[in-house]
Image (cartoon, rainbow, N blue to C red):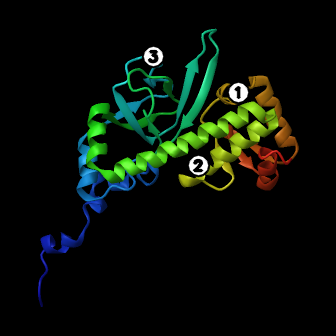
Amino acid sequence: MKTVSPLSEQKDIALEDVHPCATCGARPLGVCADLKGHELQNMACNSENVNVSAGQALVHEGDPNPFVFNVVEGAVKLYRILPDGRRQITGFLFQGDFLGLGGRSVSTVTAEALTPLQACRFKRGDFDQLLNAMPALEHRLVSLAGDELMAAQEQIVLLGRKTAKERLASFLIRLGERQQQLGGAVNHVLLPMTRLDIADYLGLTIETVSRVMTQLKTSGMIRLLPGNDVEITDPDRLLALAEGEG
């Protein structure tokens, strides 16, 4: 009986299948999703792990911005402070999202952890070299930039034309869809952000957000759960409301 050595058994095993990054939950949706073999190894060698506690910032608005980040685990809020002191939240990032496409010299936003956060951090110059060396990485980043542009356009419509109910319905629908992409339960929305955060993102007051939440609950579209979670109990009606048909 012929004995097969462990070394020969491993010849057909792809590097990306045994690399530590292979088990990263962020990889399927992250900037490194399309990398194979030694590309993945090269990417990992040029990154460092960063762990941030909830409430701490990865970057501050106006500070030098020498790094880009890929969110491995946790949630982030992005915001700017207006000259009169008001805060505008411009977005939320989750597992697999990329931070640092804009503001090459100084950061245009503050990125603050909503939960304990783990991220891969790259020096901007090193990341630029990776882009030049890896077409798959460049193509993936272009795709992510396109998604970010579409999200920005949707936010303009949301803030400019939608009612308070439509804004909150849109927010819950989109957040639920994102969490499903990450393996979350259908129609179960986790809210790592506060209602004030939601208000500052949707251009509303915290009182309006609380009132509309209650209205959506009373109408049977959602159910408020312990731990700041929301169950979408009538997704068709909530989606119709979000699209202005409610």
Q: Secondary structure at mark 1?
A: helix
Front residue of 6/133: it is: 133
User: Which comes before the other along the chain, label 1 or label 3?
Assistant: 3
Residue at mark 3: 62
- Whether residue 95 is visible here, answered yes or no, is no
Instruction: Give the total of numbered labels.
Output: 3
- Which residue is depicted at the point 75% across and 26% down? 204
Q: Residue 179: which numbered mark, if any?
A: 2
Q: Amino acid at mark 1?
A: Ala
Q: Nearer the viewer, mark 1 or mark 3?
A: 3
- Which residue is depicted at the point 59% across and 43% down? 150
User: Which comes before the other along the chain, label 2 or label 3?
Assistant: 3
Q: Is 237 left or right of 124, judged from the image as shown?
A: right
Q: Residue 182: which numbered mark, if any?
A: none
Front residue of 104/44: it is: 104
Q: Amino acid at mark 3?
A: Gly
Q: Is 68 left or right of 184, judged from the image as shown?
A: left
Residue at mark 1: 199
Marks 1/3: CA–CA distance: 24 Å
Q: Amino acid at mark 2?
A: Gln
- Which residue is depicted at the point 60% across and 14% down? 82
